[in-house]
Amino acid sequence: MIAQDPECAEMSRLRRFGFIDARRTDDPVRRKVRSRGVPPGLQNHEIFYTEDVREASDLIGRALSPIVLTVRNPDPQPFAAMMFGVRMRDVSMFYIDLTVATTVKMRSVGPYYAVHMPTNGRVICEQNGRTFDANPIQAAVTSPGDDLTMALDDDSPQLVIRFEQDAVTSHLTRLLGGSLRRPIAFEPEMDLTTDDAMRWNGAIQLLHSEIYHEGSLIHRGQGVGPMEELLMSTLLLLQPSNYRSQLVRPTGSPTKRVIRNTLDYIETHLSERITMTDLAVNAHMSIRAIQQGFHDELGTSPMLYLRDRRLERARGDLTDAVPSDGVTVTEIAQRWGFNHLGSFAVLYRKRWGESPSETLRQ
């Protein structure tokens, strides 16, 4: 049974799931299950608990992608499923526990990247015709469109970090200074025991700490963007993919290097007034050369790119805001250089299909 969580009325910054309602069961009688090791930061963010296989399949499918869930070798321990989780903007953290041996089949991973990290037990993964184990020292990484089957042993809960595809693509575009010629595809196995993997584990611990402590930057709405960028950068730099070599050993034309530096300048001064002259002076190139470089590498103009990034930052602030902040659409629009509220609203709706005020009220 699913019911509205009264805490949702408080509009916590960490309870907004665009792909699944942040609700929790209110059934006062639950079959007692042993402690499942839910991370402390997620214990107050239960999404659902159910003992119905079909309902569990449906709810997990909303949070990830449509799945077929079957229980293997039913035993005296009845099935139960629970999920805890939070979402920031484009990064989510889930804890999923199916309690008994199950098989999860996902025909095609949706528009997101995910790292599945079992915290106990063993999961046999079949991904695009490749079979491997996932366990507490080896994670499974999925990319959009992957075919995925997971055979979970008894007591094999997992922590899942989900990254929205568009956000990762945009972030990598800024890091490389050019549009991507093909989708990002990660290697499916992530070794969590290497020295490099310690950086990934450290980033996850930082995220957990920010979620756990009520006075953290994330809870105050001040650190969501940097935290997500840290997590995306760490994944892109550490996990083998079809773009990792370009990040680890950047090469390319002088123009591409100039574009990367210009994108860095824009990010640093995004809330300030920026002109084409500013960009040209920073890059030690002519205005025409900067414009041509953006056209060739990004398929847009510097000013259109700047406007789009400001729209994205405005959306982030609107998404993060809660009523207690007392912020307004006008305040956020002006913060990011949109002084004409009507024009801002038109651009915003064209980009995201809803008005700024609708985003603020969600």
Image (spheres, helix red, strand yellow):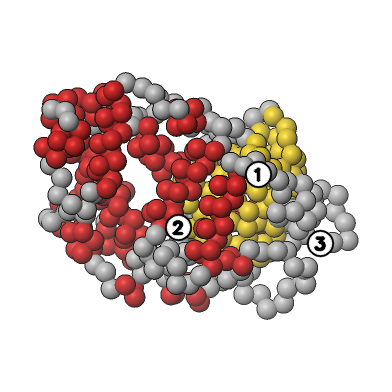
Regarding mark 2 in the picture, which secondary structure is present there? loop
Residue at the spot of label 1: 192
Q: Residue at x 72, y 77 (%)?
A: 29
Say which amino acid is labelled 1.
Answer: Leu
Q: CA distance from mark 2 to mark 3?
A: 34 Å
| Quadrant containing the C terminus in the rendered view | bottom left
Q: Is residue 126 left or right of residue 314?
A: right
Residue at the spot of label 2: 88
Q: Is residue 342 left or right of residue 254?
A: left
Observer able to see residue 77? yes
Q: Is residue 4 above or below residue 354?
A: below
Q: CA distance from mark 2 to mark 1?
A: 24 Å
Q: Is residue 12 left or right of residue 123?
A: left
Most foreground residue, 73 or 93 = 93
Residue at the spot of label 3: 78
Regarding mark 1 in the picture, which secondary structure is present there? loop
**Looking at the image, which residue sits at the far bottom?**
28
Q: Is residue 264 above or below residue 9?
A: above
Image spot of residue 203 (x, y percent): 53, 52
Say which amino acid is labelled 3.
Answer: Pro
Q: Residue at x 73, y 64 (%)?
A: 36
Q: Residue at x 36, y 69 (%)?
A: 322
Say which amino acid is labelled 2.
Answer: Met
Q: CA distance from mark 3 to mark 1?
A: 32 Å
Mark nearest the camera among 2 and 1 is 1
